[in-house]
Amino acid sequence: MAVCFFNTMSRKLEPFVPLEPPKVKLYTCGPTVYNFAHIGNFRAYIFEDLLKRYLRFRGYDVFHVMNITDVEDKLIRTCRETEKPLKEITDFYIEAFFKDLDILQIERADVYPRATEHIPEMVEIIKKLREKGHTYEHEGSIYFRLSSFPRYGKLSHMNIEELKIGASGRVDTDEYEMEDARDFALWKAWDEEDGDVFWETELGKGRPGWHIECSAMSMKYLGESFDIHCGGVDNMFPHHENEIAQSECATEKTFVKYWLHCAHLVVDGKKMSKSLGNFYTLRDLLERGLEPLAIRWVLMATHYRQPNNFTFETVESASNSIRRIRDFRLRLNEIKGGGDELVEESSLCEKLFVDSLDDDLNISSALGAVFDFIRDVNKKVDAGKVGEKGAQNAINLLNKLNKVTGLFNPDFEEDVPTEVLEKVMQRQQARRDKNFTLADMIRNQLFEQGWVIEDAPQGPRVKRK
RNA sequence: GGCGGCAUGGCCAAGUGGUAAGGCAGAAGCCUGCAAAGCUUCCAUUCCCCGGUUCGAAUCCGGGUGCCGCCUCCA
């Protein structure tokens, strides 16, 4: 079986065949750095992390580009309100963004191009579009003329004629300077509100529109046609649609082969919003004492095309699942001597895991295979059948699959403080003396200090609570 | 109004025609000095509702209900 993805463009599951195997060129829409990213953003980034890790696991040579939008309306407004330079604000949030990625164990992209550092590339594309007659100017701003691109709407299945009506009632066409309310800005002429945020270019004094940055930066690092473009469903229209229009008009080539879109995260069944009080950044969750790995689990464990309902209860449940895996590994580490090597169990688990993820990243099914494996192995361990080699094979498999999910290697407490170990020894002596009152007292004491003692056949097992 | 998605046990969630994975929570048992961990058993005669197709449907078709997203530069 081959890797298959649901391509938004065709609305079908398609076998994945990169343009130049084994290379895979991947572009994912990144953050606008005007604030801390929220967990909904991270849902998308974790989906993309799984995608990239899995492609690498399957032998592809992935080159990943994620843009950073560091010039845009909200940012300019923030500059005005705080009277700080643009770069000071964006640098701060970019640093915070990377820190959050690390906490969630999201692997870094190969390149994080910033919009402000690619103005010349954007200008080039706009010039090319202008030469080909896809643009018009109005008061110094340059707009893309949608009517010049008949295929517009093919990704989102939006009907261009109906868009024209502005049926949402939220588009007041009278306010638009464009020929048509659907047209979008490639280049925005400077006005006073922009302050010192502008570039003097051949197109005049101004700044780029949002959509053009993704076209410019993706094509710069990945070429005029590349394999995969990801983003949240909300970016499908108009952002990705506009990217297609600009890029394909400029190059006359197919821009992207596979479009993958991630569904939204909701919290307690509702869209996150500050007014509902269910809007969380990663910081907010960590302050509440949630485990980063459990957050990663929750964000990853729902199929990327399903809406993910984030609740504290689910995170708690994920923490318990992680504990089960940790305990399984602790148990395997204690095994000595000869016995079953778990060859069949390991290969079955890996096969099911791969088959599941091949199928449009069916992570739930893949996790199911891992838990089946854990149960089967535990059963054999209980029966005393598993040898050291088998335990090592099982650990190796978890480590291997962990490269894909980042969920199967929770931190161990290798560094148990000596005073805790001394207490454990004391307790062992008490148990040998059949002084169970003292033994239980010590165990309770340690529990109060955050340590759990389990009496395994091989001796006491010390774990953090 | 247009486009799209979703509806499976207390919670999360697989499963696209063959008779309901898995995790968490819960109950009982085994094990244990007692626990914990682990294992075993139990926990949806049923997959939003109503029709239809079929030997057979959670899965296909028709209708309905509910929830959600997009249609302004929100992942």
Image (cartoon, grey):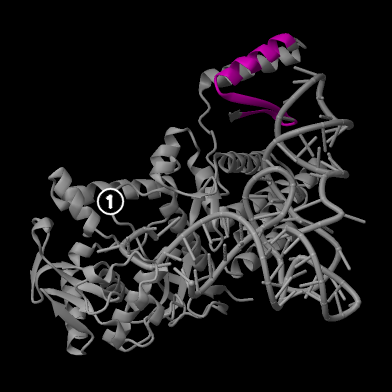
Residue at horizontal 44%, vertical 50%? A105
Residue A460 in magenta? Answer: yes
Q: Secondary structure at mark 1?
A: helix
What is the chain identity of the residue bearing mark 1? Answer: A
Q: Within 10 angstroms of label 1, few (less than 14), some, or many (20 or more) residues?
A: many
Residue A305 in magenta? Answer: no
Q: Nearer the viewer, residue A424 or A450?
A: A450
Q: Is residue A17 placed above or below B67 in the rendered structure?
A: below
Instruction: Tell me: A431 left or right of A296.
Output: right
Residue at horizontal 13%, vertical 49%? A85
Q: How far across and how far down the image is residue A336, in percent?
A: 71, 41
Residue at horizontal 64%, vertical 65%? A356
Residue segment shown in magenta: A437-462
Quadrant (top left/top right/bottom left/bottom right) for the C terminus of chain A? top right
| Residue A104 visible to the viewer | yes
Q: Nearer the viewer, residue A90 or B32?
A: A90
- Residue on which the image places disc 1: A94
Instruction: Tell me: A15 left or right of A210.
Output: right
| Residue A280 visible to the viewer | no
Q: How far across and how far down the image is residue A56, in percent?
A: 49, 66
Residue A350 placement: quadrant: bottom right
